[in-house]
Structures are given as structure tokens and as C-alpha cells.
Amino acid sequence: MRWLVVLLIGCGGPQAAKPPAPPTCTQVADGMVANMQATQEHEVPGETIDMIKDIIRTACDRDAWSEGAKRCMATMKKTPEDADRCAAQLTDEQLKALIRDEESRLPKR
């Protein structure tokens, strides 16, 4: 039994599994847009998709979204519950900035 204790101490003891790295802002944008596209009734033009991805990616980078917010947004499903849950991961300032960016750059419907 003593050799096991010595071996564990010598090897640094049991190693906890590292949690996966948080998604990058590009992965967040790609995930959010992929989900949006999967739930749309009509096809969204490619240039609009690119603009939406850029808005999300820029806001995420610029406003330093938390790991929790990135994970939530990257895997979010287009439901009111998921939208509320993920929006709650952003600060009021981050959410206002994202909405402001969307409103200023996307064409009015």
C-alpha cells in the first residue's frame, strides 16, 4: 500500500479531467446562426447570414462574453426558454450592445 501512496505523490496524484475549452466567438456565432437557419421557414440570404455571424462574433469578442454565455449561446435552441436562459448569461450592457448592433446593421423587416 505504501508504494501506491508514493506512486500517487510522485505522479502528482489523481488528475482531474480538464473541462473542455469554451467555444470561441466564431464557434458561438456559427452555432447560433446554424440553429437559426434550421428553424427558419424561409431561406436567409448568404450575405445576411455573414452579417449576423459578424455581429455576434464582434459583440462576443468586444464585450468579453463569459465562458458560460459562450457555451449557452453556441448550443442554444431557438425556443423562448433557451433564449431567456442564454440572454441571462449576458450582462445588461452586453445584451444592449448586441441588440443595438443588430438593429443598426440588419435591414428592417
Image: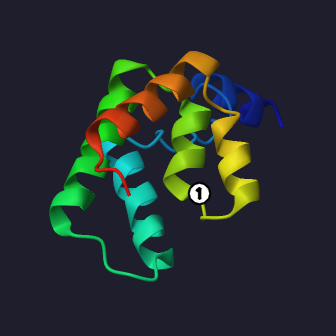
User: Mark 1 belongs to which amino acid?
Assistant: Met
Query: In percent of the image, x 46 and y 40: which residue is there?
Result: 21
For this orientation, the residue located farthest to the bottom is 41
* x and y, in percent, of residue 65 in the image: 49, 26
In the image, is residue 44 above or below residue 90?
Answer: below
Quarter of the figure with residue 59:
top left
Whether residue 31 sits left or right of residue 73 in the image: it is left
Instruction: Point out residue 47 in the picture as x, y percentages from the top left corner.
Output: 16, 60
Q: Left or right: 92 with respect to 65?
A: right
- Look at the image and tell me in which quarter the C terminus lies: bottom left
Q: Quadrant of the N terminus?
A: top right
Q: Residues within 10 Å of mark 1 (few under 14, many from 20)?
A: some
Residue on which the image places disc 1: 76
Which residue is found at the position 76% from the left and 29% from the top?
5
The correct choice, above or below, for 29 with respect to 96 in the image is below
Number of numbered discs: 1
Q: Residue furthest right?
A: 1
The secondary structure type at the circle numbered 1 is: loop
Q: Residue at x 49, y 52 (%)?
A: 74
> Which of these two is toward me, 96 or 2?
96
Q: x, y (%) of residue 69?
A: 58, 36
Is 35 situated above or below 95? below
Q: Relative to residue 87, is residue 32 drawn left or right?
A: left
> Is 88 rendered above or below residue 30?
above
Closer to the camera in the image, 34 or 109: 109
**What residue appears at the point 41 percent right and 47 percent down from the top-left corner?**
28
Q: How is the image coloured?
A: rainbow
Task: Specify the quadrant of the image occupied by residue 7.
Answer: top right
